[in-house]
Image (cartoon, rainbow, N blue to C red):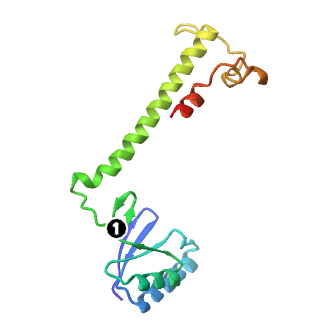
């Protein structure tokens, strides 16, 4: 049986020709791996995909292997499997996701700086001298009916506006 595999971290991609004998043998091989290693294989997050494979056959393979059936293009770690890594357009989804994460972190940092300025004003903190805070900032941002000062929680307001 000719198998080609690709491994990354705890993921394994196995490429083989689409025929019943190979599907059954792969399933047996994975069960043996489970018994020998003690590791579990999560078949619910595993997929069976086919290139130029009849949809009904792919569905049957999916049932036998307890995996989801996917038709190409399949994404792996955010990139389509058939993508060319040398092309700039291949990396656009990854770059966009990174920009989004960085923007989110930047907003969180901005909110933290604003909270520091607000608490410093209330407790008359400055760069030279730090005062003892007798009340936690979380209590200050609680409503008056809950024993706080009713100051607005900037983090909650920011999340609501976003």
In this rendering, the answer to whether 41 lies above or below 155 is below
User: Along the line of sight, which residue is nearer the eye, 162 or 6?
Assistant: 162
The number of numbered badges drawn on the structure is: 1
| Quadrant into which the N terminus falls | bottom left
Residue located beneath label 1 in the image: 73
Is 27 on the left-hand or right-hand side of 93?
right
Is 130 on the left-hand or right-hand side of 111?
right
Is 128 on the left-hand or right-hand side of 152?
left
Residue 86 pos. (x, y %): 21, 57
Q: Say which residue appears at 46% left-offset and 72% top-offset.
A: 47
Q: Could you say whether the residue bearing mark 1 is in a helix, strand or loop?
A: loop
Tell me if residue 147 can be seen: no
Q: Say which residue appears at 72% left-offset and 18% top-offset.
A: 135
Q: Quadrant of residue 98?
A: top left
Residue 77 pos. (x, y %): 40, 58
Dot 1 alpha-carbon crowd within 10 angstroms: few under 14, some 14 to 19, many 20 or more: some
Residue 2 pos. (x, y %): 33, 86
In this rendering, the answer to whether 66 lies above or below 98 is below
Tell me if residue 58 can be seen: yes
Q: Residue furthest bottom?
A: 21
Q: Say which residue appears at 48% left-offset and 85% top-offset.
A: 60
Residue 140 pos. (x, y %): 69, 20
In this rendering, the answer to whether 160 lies above or below 128 is below
Q: Quadrant of residue 7?
A: bottom left
């Amino acid at each position: 049986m000719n198998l080609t595999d690709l491994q990354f971290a705890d993921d394994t991609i196995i490429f083989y020709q689409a025929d019943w004998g190979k599907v059954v043998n792969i399933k047996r091989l994975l069960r043996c791996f489970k018994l020998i290693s003690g590791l579990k294989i999560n078949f619910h997050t595993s997929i069976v995909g086919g290139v130029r494979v009849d949809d009904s056959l792919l569905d049957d393979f999916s049932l036998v292997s307890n995996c989801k059936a996917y038709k190409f293009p399949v994404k792996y770690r955010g990139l389509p499997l058939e993508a060319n890594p040398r092309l700039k357009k291949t990396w656009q989804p990854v770059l966009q996701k990174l920009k989004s994460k960085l923007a989110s972190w930047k907003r969180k940092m901005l909110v933290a700086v604003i909270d520091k300025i607000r608490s410093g004003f209330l407790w008359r903190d400055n760069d030279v001298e730090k005062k003892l805070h007798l009340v936690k900032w979380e209590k200050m941002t609680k409503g008056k009916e809950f024993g706080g000062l009713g100051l607005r929680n900037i983090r909650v307001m920011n999340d609501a506006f976003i």
